[in-house]
Image: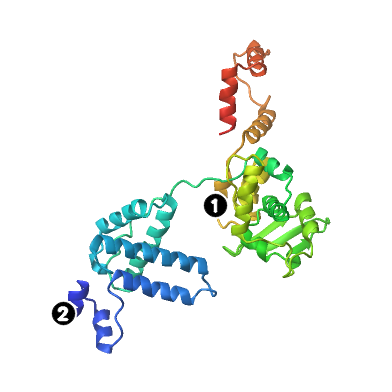
Amino acid sequence: HKEIKDSLGFVTAELVKNALKGIAQKPLTLMKLFEEHNDEFKKRVGVDRKKEAHDLYVVSYNHLLAFIRKKYDADDVMLRSLNLRFYEDYELFLRTDRGLQQKTVHQHLYNFKKITKRAFNQGTLRRDPYMKLFPELPPLKSRHLKLEDLEKLMQCQLDRPNLRRARDLFVFSTFTGLCHADLTRLSDEHIEQASDGSLWIHTERQKTGTPECVRLMEIPLKIVEKYKGMDSNGKLLPMLTKESMNRHLKKMSVMCGINRPISFHQARHTFGSIICLSQGIPIETVSKIMGHRHITTTQRYAKVTQDKIDRDVDCLNGIISGRFSLSDIDTAPSPILKDYSQRRVNPSMKQREYITKIMEG
């Protein structure tokens, strides 16, 4: 009883019972518990966990160890010593010493919180000191290409085969919404024909396991025909690695006169924003097509373009025109319409600059 109280600061009947039965006590220090978590996680890789997730926990472990060594000149700290100051100092360390961006800081703090929650769940801590703390997450932004940039990429003349292939695969993803991991697994068995003769891709997202159902439109069909039978493993498309693809796309952005670097995952964002939502496809439909679990994920792609606003407002105007009336107002056409229409036809240079800025976001 005394030993447990000295080490943990509190005693429970279960802890005393386990000690009497010789059951091994759980780690009492932060890094030891983190190491135990990572070892267990590694055993589940390939079963219900991914190697990339384990690698991220290893990076979080190394960041936390570096912080403890700098702050406390030690390799570990007692779990019972954790407090708000420790959390705030660790966050500052990640931002300053490690120079990490907001989203990356959020991920490492989230991993750290999982360890303290584990300590609480196993009875090593009487309460989780960070239960009510939520790492700040930056606003999620849609990373889609502008329509004019997509057209530049599609029309650009490329002389190297690998560049052409990377561009074609990017365009395929742009018109189907399939990410790199799902395209890599795609084969003929995922293609099904509907009763009207159209071809559809039926698969599941590797990331979430949710179903994806995408129609093969004209451009993706041509790309499938172009590369049919070229993959050595019998897959539908001869995929390049994501790293190789991103290198080629970065070069192409310069060659095509696009003033921003391109990554392969932007194709999926472009599908959601430009190909679907901006063309009037309901967000609920887009969510199902892209295999999102929650519609809030799809809302990240819902950056409405000016063309979309114009079409929707014109449609609204047609629907409500003549359906409502206001008493004591002359129904004759107002001369003010003529005044504004002339402004629109002949805008001043200052107005043009202002309108351009608005339309470019």
- The percent position of residue 301, horizontal first and vertical second, equals 58, 46
Residue 141 visible, this angle: yes
Q: In the rendered view of the protein, which quadrant contains the C terminus?
A: top right
- The percent position of residue 277, horizontal first and vertical second, equals 64, 44
Pick the front one: 8 or 181: 181
Determine which quarter of the picture holds residue 62.
Answer: bottom left
Residue 281 visible, this angle: no
Q: Seen from this angle, which residue lies furthest bottom?
A: 21
Disc 1 on helix, strand or loop? helix
In this picture, residue 61 sits left or right of residue 209: left
Q: In the rendered view of the protein, which quadrant contains the N terminus?
A: bottom left
Residue type, numbered disc 2: Lys
In this picture, residue 32 sits left or right of residue 327: left
Q: Which residue is mark 2?
A: 2
Residue type, numbered disc 1: Thr
Q: Residue at x 56, y 46 (%)?
A: 143
Determine which quarter of the picture holds residue 117.
Answer: bottom left
Q: Seen from this angle, which residue lies furthest left?
A: 2
N-terminal label among 2 and 1: 2
Residue 297's label in the rendered image is 1
